[in-house]
């Protein structure tokens, strides 16, 4: 992409109303715009990051045999009345058509996916079944001041699975937890698996995937020696009950994902039966847009964002000075390298500041000074090297 040809430029200053780092930096660097509290437009750079996160999640869900679909955001009220959610879920957005029919906006998709699965599950041979999609969710959140980390409209990957018995469910639950850890690792995040109660869904155990960050809204305690982590509510211990060696530390964290054992609640509500048995159902969420915000909270410095390679909007930020860089841009692009090419006539200083703000992991400079070499610098290092194009391409691949 040529920077001269996009209208979505960076700003000199962060928006005044922004209270969190992700909100400030994502707006200033030209990734998102806020339409109203909790509702954002994703500009080309931001849209690319969302797609990259989605793709990593997609690959890991496919790898555990889940099938991708795309379910609607507009739901008939009847489905939500069947499960009681219509009256009990306070964040549910409800609307009425001009013919006075009631609808709900997707706050989650159990009410849609269960009747869908019912149509296709005809016998025990059809189980286990796992379905997922990546779709927008709507929630009437009271407070939405954490940038894209708490949206009233946000992108979620939600997966649902059905099993003949608890044993089969437990096996898949374990597989899904492992897939989640792979996802967060590929995103450059350390997610702590936190045991929690099932909340509104069920009394069974659920697990949250928490990333430590001051801008998170979850209070947790984690062991400083092993991987033990719990929700803080009513927890009054200081030594780790798991390894008995570590001390528990208090922290705030952001929940980037969770997995629930839903039991037979939804199978019963929609009368989904196999050989007279209601299957055990699980649901597994990952907040795609929240995760993007968490990544900015974790990876930034005083100059701007520092994207992990795996989800950076582009692989390199090519700065051309004095009208140079065309040829390198064309060759990199021809080698399938994703390049953001700053071909504007701004000063070198402005271009470098912009590159730091946007946060692409590698900056290349072509100028009169670089001759037949290319200046190579990583965003998170001060080391500058002068390399051949071939060497640059080799490193990027
Ligand atoms: P929270 O406790 O943060 O409100 P939740 O328990 O309501 O989360 P789920 O309904 O299980 O979350 O949704 C699955 C995932 O979607 C969460 O783990 C989180 O990453 C993300 N998520 C939930 N609510 C929001 C929101 N308002 N904005 C952005 N992402 C969200
Ligand atoms: Mg919530």
Image (cartoon, rainbow, N blue to C red):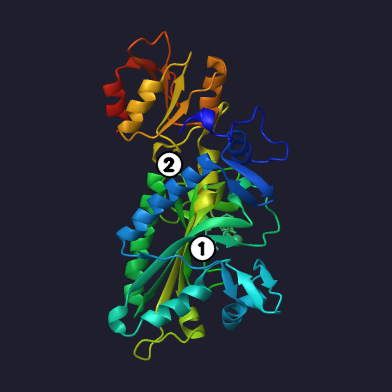
Q: Nearer the viewer, mark 2 or mark 1?
A: 2
Residue 250 is labelled as none
SS class, disc 1? strand
Residue marked by disc 2: 311
Residue shown at 62% from the left, 49% from the top: 40
Quadrant location, the C terminus: top left
**From this viewpoint, is residue 203 visible?**
no
311 on left or right of 390 = right
Residue shown at 41% from the left, 77% from the top: 117
**From this viewpoint, is residue 367 visible?**
yes
Question: Could you tell me if the residues under marks 2 and 1 are in contact, i.e. CB atoms within 8 Å?
Answer: no
Q: Earlier in the sequence, mark 2 or mark 1?
A: 1
Q: Position of residue 27 (x, y in %)?
A: 62, 38
292 on left or right of 272 = right
Q: Position of residue 225 (x, y in %)?
A: 42, 45
Camera-side residue of 280 and 248: 280
Mark 2 close to ligand 1, CB under 8 Å: no
SS class, disc 2? helix
* Ligand 2 rendered quadrant: bottom right
- In the figure, 114 relative to 357: above or below? below
Q: CA distance from mark 2 to mark 1?
A: 29 Å
Residue marked by disc 1: 196
311 on left or right of 373 = right
Q: Position of residue 158 (x, y in %)?
A: 46, 63
Q: Position of residue 194 (x, y in %)?
A: 48, 57
């Amino acid at each position: 992409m040529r920077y001269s040809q996009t209208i979505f430029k960076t700003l000199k200053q962060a928006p005044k109303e922004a209270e969190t780092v992700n909100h400030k930096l994502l707006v200033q660097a030209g990734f998102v715009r806020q339409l109203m509290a909790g509702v954002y437009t994703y500009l080309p750079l931001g849209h690319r990051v969302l797609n990259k996160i989605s793709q990593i999640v997609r690959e890991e869900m496919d790898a555990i045999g889940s099938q991708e679909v795309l379910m609607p955001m507009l739901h008939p009220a009847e489905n939500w009345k069947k499960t009681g959610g219509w009256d009990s879920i306070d964040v549910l957005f409800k609307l009425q058509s001009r013919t006075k029919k009631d609808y709900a906006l997707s706050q989650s998709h159990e009410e849609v996916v269960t009747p869908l699965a019912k149509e296709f599950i005809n016998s025990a041979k059809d189980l286990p079944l796992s379905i997922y999609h990546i779709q927008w969710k709507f929630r009437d959140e009271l407070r939405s001041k954490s940038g894209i980390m708490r949206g009233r409209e946000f992108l979620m990957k939600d997966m649902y699975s059905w099993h003949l018995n608890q044993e089969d469910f437990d096996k898949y639950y374990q597989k899904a937890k492992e897939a989640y850890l792979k996802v967060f690792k590929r995103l450059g995040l350390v997610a702590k698996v936190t045991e929690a109660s099932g909340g509104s869904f069920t009394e069974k155990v659920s697990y949250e995937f928490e990333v430590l960050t001051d801008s998170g809204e979850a209070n947790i305690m984690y062991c400083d020696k092993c991987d033990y982590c719990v929700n803080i509510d009513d927890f009054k211990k200081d030594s780790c009950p798991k390894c008995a060696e570590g001390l528990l530390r208090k922290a705030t964290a952001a929940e980037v994902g969770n997995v629930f054992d839903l039991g037979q609640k939804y199978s019963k509500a929609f009368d989904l039966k196999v050989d007279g048995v209601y299957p055990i159902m699980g649901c597994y969420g990952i907040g795609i847009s929240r995760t993007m915000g968490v990544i900015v909270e974790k990876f930034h410095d005083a100059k701007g964002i520092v994207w992990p390679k795996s989800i950076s909007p582009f692989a390199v930020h090519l700065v051309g000075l004095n009208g140079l860089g065309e040829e390198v841009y064309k060759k990199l692009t021809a080698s399938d390298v994703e390049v953001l090419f700053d071909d504007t006539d701004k000063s070198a200083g402005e271009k470098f500041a912009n590159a730091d703000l946007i946060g692409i992991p590698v900056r290349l400079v072509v100028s009169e000074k670089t001759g037949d070499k290319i200046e190579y610098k990583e965003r998170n290092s001060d080391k500058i090297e002068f390399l051949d194009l071939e060497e640059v391409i080799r490193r990027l691949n």
